Image (cartoon, rainbow, N blue to C red):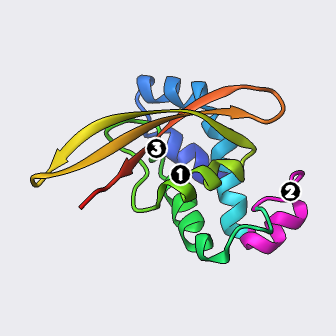
Amino acid sequence: MLKEYFALQATFSDHMKELANQNRFDYIFSKAYLYLKMGPEIYRRKDAFQMPNIEWDKEYYPELQYGCEQLLIAKGLLKDNPIENIDTLSFKYLFSMFHYDCINIKSHVLEVDNKVSFIDEVLFQHYIDESLITYFQWVKYY
């Protein structure tokens, strides 16, 4: 895991390194990596808050996996490189797995091919230490 993280971080500009630090990317990266390595059931058993929540419909698991895969390539840290192709609830669940609650969403209108969609700028707060992070999601509307 460290090899992959340091290889990715070596590609970051100074601005991206600052964003990664502000948004606890090392922590998010490690949690996403472990989820992908362990799968939802083992991850839940080892997680302090038993995430992903056992009550969540398993239909969300593929989107959680895809969200984690995108985090491992640093998607979501920038407005112009948002996490995409997962629904809004899955995006919230993704960060809940890392012990963050959604506390604010600011939507930015985006027009692509004459279709309106949104980039959501989502502010999350950690359950325990109350740290704040911001990640971006592309919400497509057709």
Q: Secondary structure at mark 3?
A: loop
Residue at mark 3: 76
Q: Amino acid at mark 2?
A: Asp
Is the residue 114 above or below the residue 27 in the image? Answer: below
Choose top left, top right, bottom left or bottom right for residue 58. bottom right
Circle 2 Cα neighbour tier, 10 Å, few/some/many (<14 / 14–19 / ≥20)? some
Q: Is residue 46 magenta?
A: yes
Q: CA distance from mark 2 to mark 1?
A: 19 Å
| Disc assigned to residue 101 | none
Q: Quadrant of the C terminus?
A: bottom left
- Provide the major secondary structure of the magenta segment: helix
Residue 60: x and y, percent? 60, 70
Residue at x-position 40% and y-position 56%? 84
The stretch in magenta equals 38-52
Crowd rating for badge 3 (residues with CA inside 10 Å; few <14, some 14–19, many 20+): many
Picture coordinates of residue 61, whole percent (x, y): 62, 71
Residue 72 visible (yes or no): no
Q: Which mark sits nearer the N-terminus, 2 or 3?
A: 2
Q: Which residue is mark 1?
A: 71
Residue at numbered disc 2: 47
Asked if the residue at tag 1 contacts the one at tag 2, i.e. Cβ–Cβ closer than 8 Å, the answer is no
